[in-house]
Amino acid sequence: MKPMAISLFLVAFATALLAQTGAQQSFDGLKALAGTWVGTVRTIPVQADVEGQSAQVTMRVTSMGNALMHEITSPAHPEDPLTIFYLDGDHLVLTHYCDAGNRPRMTARASADGKTIDFDFLDVSGSTKYGHMQHVTFTLMDADHHVEEWTYRRPGDKPMHARLDLTRAK
């Protein structure tokens, strides 16, 4: 193999390795959130039925460490959507089992400091008649505090943002 070909191969291999490492690092950061979290919901535009209400998030590592299950419950909102995070090749992906009756998938990109993980919309299965989840951001503050920001795309392409400022339940 010629030196130029070897160099190109090594650059391609290193790039693939770094991408996988980034996805794995983001996944490991999320798995460190396993446990029960409590906080308050804030919405833009304000949704009177949930604004200021308490919420509980339960996260559990499952499937021999290959998946992270995330469940949100709230006394103000009887549904409890379920989200599963997993590695798909060199990408961190989530599938959100939404109370709107669909299953959007999103793929992650991490910030340079690794504290913020943005999930961008990939595709959706099921009806979008009532809208669908479009974007999620996790900001890892410390071992006992993180923020989740969920963007829901309502009919007519109108976004609704929900922010959960969560602390670990002791």
Image (tube, rainbow, N blue to C red):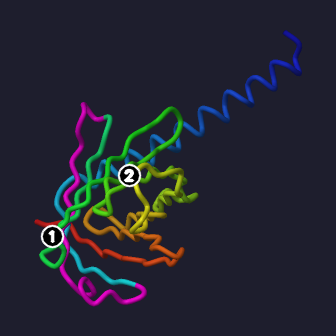
**Residue holding disc 2:** 103
Residue 152 image label: none
- On the image, numbered disc 1 is attached to which residue? 78
Q: CA distance from mark 2 to mark 1?
A: 19 Å
- Asked which quadrant contains residue 66, the reply is top left
Residue at position x 23%, y 71% from top? 167
- Magenta-drawn stretch contains 35: no
- Residue 138, quarter of picture: bottom left
Which residue is at 84% across, 9% downward? 1
Residue 96 point in image, percent of width and height: 35, 54
Q: Which residues are magenta?
A: 44-65
Q: Does residue 58 appear to the left or right of 108 in the view shown? A: left
Q: Residue sitting at 24 percent across and 43 percent down?
A: 61
**Label 1 Cα crowd, 10 Å radius (few <14 / some 14-19 / many 20+):** few
20 over 34 or under it: above or below: above
Badge 2: few (under 14), some or many (20 or more) residues near its Cα, within 10 Å? many
Q: How many marks?
A: 2
Question: Could you tell me the amino acid type at mark 1?
Answer: Pro
Residue 5 or 45: which is nearer the viewer? 45
Image point (47%, 73%), residue name? 155
